[in-house]
Image: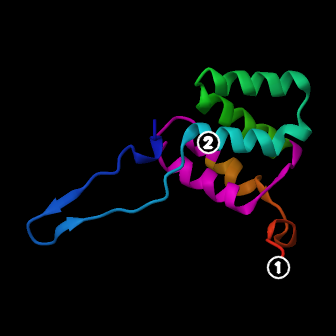
Amino acid sequence: MCLACVGLQRLASANYGWVVIVERVVYDADLAWELAEAAKPHLSAVERNDVFMAIGAGDTFAAIRRLFSWIAIRGIPVRLDLVESCTTWLHAYAGHEDERYLRGLIENFLIPLPFSEHTLSA
C-alpha cells in the first residue's frame, strides 16, 4: 500500500478548475529494505533478523522506526537520496503519534554520506 498517497486528493474548485498535486511516492517496504541494506553492516545478527522479519511480515512502520533509531544512535551514514526518501515518506504520517520523534531523528541525526562518496563517477 502506498501510504505516501494518503491524504492527497484531487482538489476541485469552480474558480480554478482541477489542481494536480505531484509528489514522489515512497513505498513503505521499499524504504524499509533500503534502510536495512544501509544499516546492515552495523547491526548484529539478532538486530538484522528482527528488522528483516518485521519487513517480511509487513510491519514496515515498526521496522523503519527501529532502523531510524539505530541509524541515528550509531551515526550510520546513509545516501542523501535515502535521507530525502525518509523525509518524503514521513509526510504520509502527518499527525501520527510518532511523527515528531521520527522527524527529529531525520532532521538531526540521519547523516548523509559525503557528496564525493555517493556521486557517480564519470
User: Would you identify the image quadrant in which residue 117 lies?
Assistant: bottom right
* First in residue order: circle 1 vs circle 2: 2
Query: Can you say whether 19 is above or below 89 in the image?
Result: below
Residue marked by disc 2 = 30
Q: Is residue 45 or residue 120 the one in the foreground?
A: 120
Amino acid type, mark 1: Ala
Q: Residue at x 49, y 58 (%)?
A: 24
Residue 52 position within the rendered picture, expressed as x and y whole percent measured from the top left = 74, 26
- What kind of element bears circle 1? loop
Q: CA distance from mark 1 to mark 2?
A: 28 Å
Count of marks overlaid on the render = 2
Colour basis: rainbow
Q: Is residue 27 left or right of residue 22?
A: right
Query: Can you say whether 59 is above or below 69 in the image?
Result: above
- What kind of element bears circle 2? helix
Q: Which mark is residue 122?
A: 1
Quadrant occupied by the C terminus: bottom right
Q: Residue at x 65, y 24 (%)?
A: 56
| Magenta segment boundaries in residue numbering | 74-102
Q: Residue at x 90, y 24 (%)?
A: 45
Query: Can you say whether 90 is above or below 52 in the image?
Result: below
Q: Is residue 111 or residue 44 the one in the foreground?
A: 44
